[in-house]
């Protein structure tokens, strides 16, 4: 079985995000970029399936700017077998929207014929949480979202997922699309020897036009602002004063 894993290049989660002075978006100048954390978990899970003998090949895909090849090399260093880079933008500030990504991924799935697609549940830059579900709909495949446990049983995948009431376990028919949550695993660090080996692993470059997909944005960002600063707290001398202050603030 082949496993396909889409990965996205995003601002590193340790970096404090800055908004441009004109409010047109986030400032990416001289900012450290890395793989979306949820996608790292997807790559790790795919590699674990291969190590367990349940997958034969792990293919990683990134859709965006040419610099995304760095993200793909990271996935290859973790243990993926080969990579596909779809160059769909020249400007690092252009975000390819979920529907366009899903359409390109569908074309790649049609070519590669994987038995399983692992996606991060969302990207930390836009928090759309939509690509995996859209891909499932376009393919007509089953889907399991927010996976915190995954096991393969023959031609089915058994997935445990967190829901409002607790944990839910579902069984889906393969091929399937699974979006993963943080609890699924802890991604490995790429060792130096594997980083060197990754430089020799295959990385094919394509364009969105190769797949006949229009990536023109359908959404317009009107304004981006920093979160409001938290107001300073105050000290109260008694429970009665606390209740009074809460009433004044409309909290009770």
Image: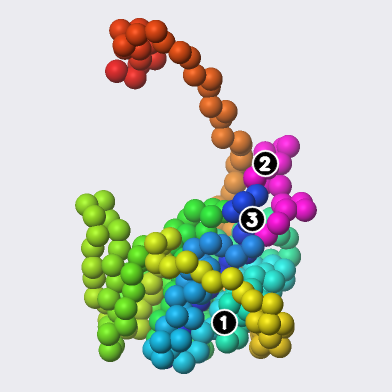
- Callout 2: 10 Å neighbours few (<14), some, many (20+)? some
* Residue 19 numbered mark, or none: 2
Left or right: where 67 falls relative to 54:
right
- Which residue position holds label 1? 79
Query: What whole-number distance in Å separates the C-alpha atoms at marks 1 and 3?
Result: 23 Å
Figure disc tally: 3
**Picture quadrant of residue 202:** bottom right
Earlier along the polypeptide chain: callout 2 or callout 3?
3
Residue 23 highlighted magenta (yes or no): yes
From which residue to which does the magenta span run? 16-33
Please tell me which residue is depicted at 51% across the width and 69% down the height of the picture: 187
Left or right: where 159 falls relative to 223:
left
Q: Secondary structure at mark 3?
A: strand
Please tell me which residue is depicted at 24% across the width and 55% down the height of the picture: 166
- Callout 1: 10 Å neighbours few (<14), some, many (20+)? many
- Which residue position holds label 3? 11
């Amino acid at each position: 079985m082949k496993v396909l894993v889409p990965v996205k290049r995003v601002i590193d989660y340790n970096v404090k995000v800055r908004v441009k002075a004109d409010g047109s978006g986030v400032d990416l100048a001289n900012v450290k970029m890395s793989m979306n954390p949820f996608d790292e978990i997807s790559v790790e899970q795919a590699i674990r399936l291969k190590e367990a003998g349940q997958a034969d090949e792990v293919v990683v895909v990134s859709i965006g700017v040419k610099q995304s090849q760095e993200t793909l090399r990271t996935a290859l260093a973790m243990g993926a077998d080969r990579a596909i880079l779809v160059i769909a933008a020249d400007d690092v500030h252009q975000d390819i929207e979920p529907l366009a990504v899903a359409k390109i991924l569908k074309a790649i799935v049609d070519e590669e014929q994987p038995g399983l697609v692992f996606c991060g549940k969302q990207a930390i830059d836009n928090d759309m949480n939509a690509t995996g579900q859209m891909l499932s709909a376009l393919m007509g495949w089953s889907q399991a979202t927010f996976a915190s446990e995954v096991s393969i049983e023959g031609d089915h995948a058994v997935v445990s997922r967190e829901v409002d009431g607790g944990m839910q376990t579902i069984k889906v028919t393969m091929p399937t699309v699974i979006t993963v949550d943080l609890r699924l695993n802890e991604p490995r660090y790429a060792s130096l020897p594997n980083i060197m080996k990754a430089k020799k692993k295959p990385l094919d470059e394509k364009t969105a036009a190769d797949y006949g997909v229009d990536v023109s944005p359908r959404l317009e960002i009107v304004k981006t602002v920093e979160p409001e600063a938290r107001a300073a707290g105050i000290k109260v001398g008694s429970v009665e004063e606390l209740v009074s202050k809460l009433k004044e603030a409309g909290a009770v």
